């Protein structure tokens, strides 16, 4: 687009850069030049958020910017990685300056809050979508993966579940108050980066709950070659969820609802108390929800099956993308 | 998409991985884990290729896969960086298995040819587009940027120019022979990674010619605070270009045509012969096309102006994305 460089310069010049951010050269050349730290692995992931597939196209622009970055950062959190840098591939049809300013504000605010430097990107024409590549660092052999859960360990989740699905339902009912607790959970999820760092030396496995607790638990069980028993009664439910969806609906949202961006971890029994203390210092709950079993398969919530949640969908058929 | 994980597993499992590729953990977890080498900066860039904006939607799937990676790798080449890893964000409407197999073949073949490991990605529904994030490495203080051109230096380009525009014109005329020299240049550009490495200690500035020679030269001049005189007679023209477009049309294509993915470099007079010898060993020409001047602005080709090329466009209005 004729205004591409202007547009990038106007709204997406990175706030954080310079040696302290590990940015030797930021936006404006063929590549950004970054300075990885010694003794660290680089953790990288990309997630694309598409309008009317992953979020309502008419959601507040600031929330769209926040959310697109948050879902990618959540993958770093799930590895116990520290966020460092990101790149944004933005597609949009009409570059409305006010919309872009709000969108950039939401994106930059989360960059600032998580010490993530925006170091590059590109802009193309098309249906609104935001692909965000995130890069983080984690010391050698300390990354949390999906494959480390061992029989007898405790399964636990950070924060509360069901807020993503409950917030989407609220949006679809016409709720627009940005302070509505469920809507806030859906539109402005908080990537659990600090929790991932705090649990790095305690947890055996981790994943972020993006596709729904049961679906994401299934990934951990598959990767670890184990099974689990989930105590449905124990699930921490998002504030206002029971009032909005009823007890059964709330449990369904917690089990199958996507877009929660909490961490699901497996950790040894004797690490649970310390893990809880560390997260409490962050103002975040850690709730045991079940146990890892040697026998494959799922019990407790087993009758509900392992299927994931149908994400937001409107207009043309579209599909949920996974991280990597 | 229900088949997303299957689809990724079937077609996009990385061929190269393991310690030798710097991949501690590849596709299949929340993030890939990579091992940067000591003493190197990380060079990163993202480019999105959109169907009927950056390439014809009915181009061969294998060429679309090749091309989407090539245009991103070209940014690494322009920094003098060595390619290491990539991530792919793929959007497509209908996942046709045969098409995907061809697409993946083109992508993987270029990965293999350039020692680039595909370490992750995501798939969403939508208009066909491919966002490719590339990561490479370049030793501290050896990266080529746009900002180093000095008055008196020689401007030179690798390979030949105008093939991108000439190939697009051939495609639009109905040419479909994949061995047609201009079509091959347009559909399967070769990122000049080896040339970038070879010129790293000789050149003062570099950029890849993606938006057209004059437009990209303009970026170098702006970043370096200099001007240039370009000898239009000296421009190396792609094979078959004069026959296809006539002498004037060929020059226009070489000056304003985009999608060539050659390198434009500025280098001291006394480095030109050695630079030429090094590229000759790669079977690649290095052609002096002008001089850097202290006075800003462009002469020689100056009357033609600095405007870039109108990229392929059909159907909905769309726009050219730049790297970063």
Image: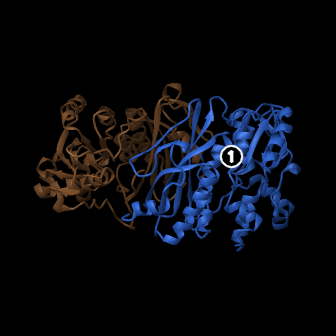
Chain colours: A blue, B brown
> Residue drawn 29% across and 34% down?
B199
Vertical position of residue A49 compared to residue A271: above or below = below
Chain label for disc 1: A
Residue, disc 1: A193
Q: Residue furthest top?
A: B20
Give SS at disc 1: helix
**Closest to the observer: A269 or B155?**
B155
Q: Position of residue A191 (x, y in %)?
A: 68, 51
Vertical position of residue B308 compared to residue B29: above or below = below
* Residue A228 position by quadrant: top right
Q: Is residue A3 left or right of residue A109?
A: left
Q: Is residue B11 left or right of residue B67?
A: right
* Residue B169 position by quadrant: bottom left
**Closest to the observer: B226 or B49?**
B226
Q: Is residue B283 left or right of residue A82?
A: left
Q: Position of residue B151 (x, y in %)?
A: 22, 46
Q: Is residue A274 left or right of residue B206?
A: right
Q: Position of residue A226 (x, y in %)?
A: 76, 33
Q: Is residue B15 visible?
A: yes
């Amino acid at each position: 687009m004729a205004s591409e460089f202007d547009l990038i310069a106007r709204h997406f010049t990175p706030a954080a850069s310079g040696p302290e951010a590990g940015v030797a050269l930021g936006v404006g050349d063929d590549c950004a030049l970054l300075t990885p730290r010694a003794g660290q692995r680089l953790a990288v992931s990309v997630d694309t958020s598409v309008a009317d597939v992953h979020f309502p196209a008419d959601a507040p622009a600031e929330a769209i910017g926040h959310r697109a970055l948050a879902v990618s950062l959540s993958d770093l959190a799930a590895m116990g990685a520290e966020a460092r840098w990101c790149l944004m591939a933005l597609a949009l049809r009409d570059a409305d300056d006010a919309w872009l300013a709000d969108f950039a504000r939401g994106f930059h605010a989360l960059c600032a809050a998580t010490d993530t430097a925006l170091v590059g990107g590109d802009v193309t024409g098309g249906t609104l979508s935001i692909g965000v590549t995130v890069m983080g660092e984690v010391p050698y052999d300390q990354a949390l993966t999906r494959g480390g859960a061992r029989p007898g360990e405790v399964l636990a989740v950070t924060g509360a579940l069901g807020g993503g699905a409950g917030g989407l339902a609220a949006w679809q009912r016409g709720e627009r108050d940005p302070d509505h607790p469920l809507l806030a959970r859906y539109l402005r999820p908080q990537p659990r980066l600090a929790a991932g760092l705090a649990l790095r030396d305690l947890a055996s496995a981790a994943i972020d709950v993006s596709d729904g607790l049961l679906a994401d638990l299934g990934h951990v069980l598959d990767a670890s070659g184990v099974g689990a028993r989930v105590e449905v009664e124990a699930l921490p439910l998002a504030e206002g969820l029971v009032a909005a969806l009823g007890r059964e609906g709330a449990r369904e949202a917690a089990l199958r609802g996507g877009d929660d961006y909490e961490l699901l971890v497996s950790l040894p029994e004797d690490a649970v108390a310390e893990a809880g203390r560390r997260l409490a210092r962050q103002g975040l709950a850690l709730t045991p929800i079940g146990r890892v079993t040697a026998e494959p398969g799922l019990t407790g919530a087993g009758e509900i099956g392992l299927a994931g949640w149908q994400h937001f969908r409107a207009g043309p058929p579209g599909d949920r993308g996974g991280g990597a």
